[in-house]
Structure formats: C-alpha cells, structure tokens
Amino acid sequence: MMSSLRTWGPWCLLVLVLAVIAVIFAGKTAGPSVLSRGPAGWLGARKYLEERGIDVLLLDRPLGGTEEAEVLVTAFPWQQSPPLLPMDPIRSFVREGGTLLIGYSGELGGTKEQQLLELLEAPLTKLGPEPPLAPVAWWRHRQREWTLVPTQEVPGNHRGHISAAPAVPRPPERARILHRLEMNSPLNISPESPLNSSSDSSWAATMDFSLGQGHVVLFPAELISNARLSEAGSVQALEALIALAPPGPWAFDEFAHGLRPMGEDGGPQAPQVAFDLFVGHLFLLYLLALTALARRFGPPFKHPPIQAGSAAAFLRGLGTLHHRCGHHARAAELLLERTQALDPRRQIPPSLAALASGAGPRAFVRLAQGLAQKRSPDGPNNKE
C-alpha cells in the first residue's frame, strides 16, 4: 500500500495541480481589452467604434507618448504588475487638455485602480459589507445584478445592466451624472458609507467632470463588454461616450493588458522570452523532482518474521527433528556425559549405562526415565 502510494502519489499531485491551474486560467483572459473575445473583453466595442469611423490606436508601451491621440481609454482590472504601469502620465494627459475614459471594475483589491481614481478626485466608495462565507450565499451574492438608469443627459430611456460591484466612484461636486443605480437594486449600502448620506434615491454609476484643461469620464467596464453589448442600454451608453469625446483618434491602453511591442526580428522582446524560458525551466525542474520521488530508492524493505511460540513447543519441535534424523544413540551418550558432569558423585548403574550403547528410541526413553528418577535420601544411587 505504501509503495503504491509512493509511486502514484506525486503523479496524482501533478494532475491535481494542473487541473487547478486549468480551472483558474480557463476563463482568465486579458480582461477589458479591445483584443479580447472573452465575455469581459472590448473587442465588440472596438469594432463598433471602427464602423462609426473612429480611428483606434493600440498602445503597447507605458503611457506617455499619447500626444497624437485626443482620447485615452483605459479599463480595469489591469493585468500587469504595478511597477510597469505609471499613473502620473495619465493625470498629466488630462490636465493638458486630453479626454480620459476610464472603465472601472469597482474591485477594492485593485490597488492601481484605487490610486488612479484618488488622483482624479473620484475615490472608490464601498457599497456593502463583505461577501458571505457560505458557498451558496457567496454564489448568490456574486450573481447579483444592478440596473443602470440613464439621466436626462443621455438620450433615450434604455436601461443597462451590470454585475454588482463592491464599490463605485464617488462623483466630485462638479461631476455630471449620466447613469444612476436604482435604489430598489440589491445594493445593501453599509451605514457608514458616504453614499448613505445623500438625499437622492439612487447612486451615480456613470459620470463625467473636468480636470484641469481636460475631461474625465467614468463608467463601469462591464457596461460595454462583449457580453453586454448586445443589450440596448449598453449600445446607448457607448453612443453617449462617443458623444462626450472629441472625434480624434481613441488610444486604448493595451500595455496594461499585456500587449508588448515586437522586436526587430518580428518576435517578442527579449525580457518576455527570458521570462517564458525561466518559467519553462521551473516547470521542468518540478517534473524532474516528481520523477525522482516516484522512483524507488533501493530494494523494498521487508520486515523480519515475528517469532512466536512457547519453550515447550520449541523443544517438542527440536525433539521431533532429532527423532527423524535418528540421533538417539548420540543423544544417549551426551545425556550420560551431562549427568556425570552435573553430579560427579552420582553412581550410574551398569545396566542403565548399557542402554546408551546403540540406543534406539525406546532405549533412549528408558535411559532418560532412569536418570530422571530421584535419588533415595540414604543412598547415592537412584532406584531403578
């Protein structure tokens, strides 16, 4: 059992790890990227903009070289590590007269999202308590949806729908509200939330405001995602974004979603290749370690058999072996020698000693019985 577990255990562990990785990354795409065909991607919105005659630029470098674009679009969650994604160029772009469109996710765990919205004076505000820990209650909590109602600033009356988020941006005082969240939606506003102090019966979801010489528009990233774009409310929201932005090129921040410039030979740049090779080496070392653990270290260990039984059974077995081999005569001679060595003063009768010569089974038994008889108290010899 232990040998089988040692042989197959590492391989079962490897299969389990690969299954977990597959489950984690099966639905993981580049998020709200205009190159993504997944449910959260913006490929449909990009195609819609191109059909409307709007030029689309894909940024594959850190923000800073966007002078040729009048509109900068970035969406959360970002897929890259914080050191590679500076935020000051985004604020400078707006203050110098650019138009910034931000699709927020509302996830409080996104540090960069919180930092950027705080720089833009629209920090994320928590809407409700932490999700429940019970699996069924947690799943129901994650399946909630909100209804977005357009204000008079947006033509038409098509309502949009998005998944419930833990937080929404708090609009600055100068902000103009484009979509609101209805109060009858399952918001579950916490008492300490600043949104609870508002006398309005709904809360802002999409807004725009000025910052410096530029313009900022905040909206839920899911509102124009591939999964929602077929809804009338989402198309109406996208048309409202087009109306708020100048007709110039729209630059989408794809560097934040993993897009990188190509090298001189047409392949990816060296740092990405080096990282891929590093990950490949780690995976190879892991497989070698599993192979080494799966192999047996030397011959299998066998426990020695446990000896069990009484002294009588052992002596009986030993006597049976000597009887089978015919050692009666030699045993009789040794019996006489041992008796005289034990008690030199004892006199053994000649008739009893004669039984030892060429003794058979019966003679050996009679000799043993004679020597085992007790000596009389008044004489050195035993009674025959």
Image (spheres, rainbow, N blue to C red):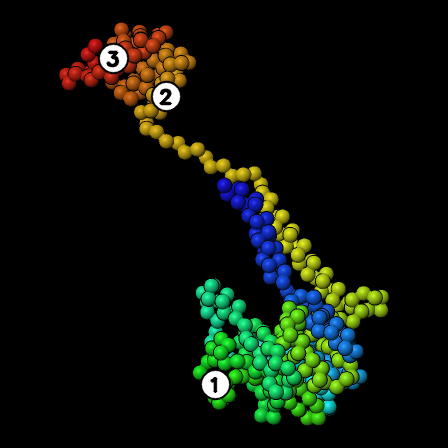
Q: Which mark is residue 317?
A: 2
**Mark 3 vs 2, N-terminal side:** 2
**Mark 1 vs 2, N-terminal side:** 1
The answer to whether any part of residue 119 appears in the image is: no
The answer for how far apart the CA atoms under marks 1 and 2 are is 95 Å
225 vs 197: above or below = above
Kindly identify which residue carries mark 1: 196
Q: Give the crowd class for mark 2: few <14, some 14-19, many >=20 residues within 10 Å.
A: few
266 vs 100: above or below = above
Q: What residue is shown at x 20% (from left), y 17% (from top)?
A: 374
Give amino acid for label 3. Gly
Q: Give the crowd class for mark 1: few <14, some 14-19, many >=20 residues within 10 Å.
A: some
Q: Are marks 3 and 2 in contact (CB under 8 Å)?
A: no
User: Horizontal and vertical percent for residue 303?
Assistant: 47, 37
181 vs 315: above or below = below
The answer to whether any part of residue 38 appears in the image is: yes
228 vs 382: above or below = below
Q: What residue is shown at x 27% (from left), y 19% (from top)?
A: 344
Of tags 1 and 3, which is closer to the observer? 1
The answer for how far apart the CA atoms under marks 1 and 3 are is 114 Å
Kindly identify which residue carries mark 3: 370
Q: What residue is shown at x 81% (from left), y 65% (from top)?
A: 267
**Which picture quadrant has residue 119?**
bottom right
User: Horizontal and vertical percent for residue 146?
Assistant: 54, 75
- State the residue in front, 296 or 139: 139
- State the residue in front, 245 or 107: 245
Of tags 3 and 2, which is closer to the observer? 2
**Which picture quadrant has residue 211?**
bottom right
Could you tell me how many numbered marks the image carries?
3
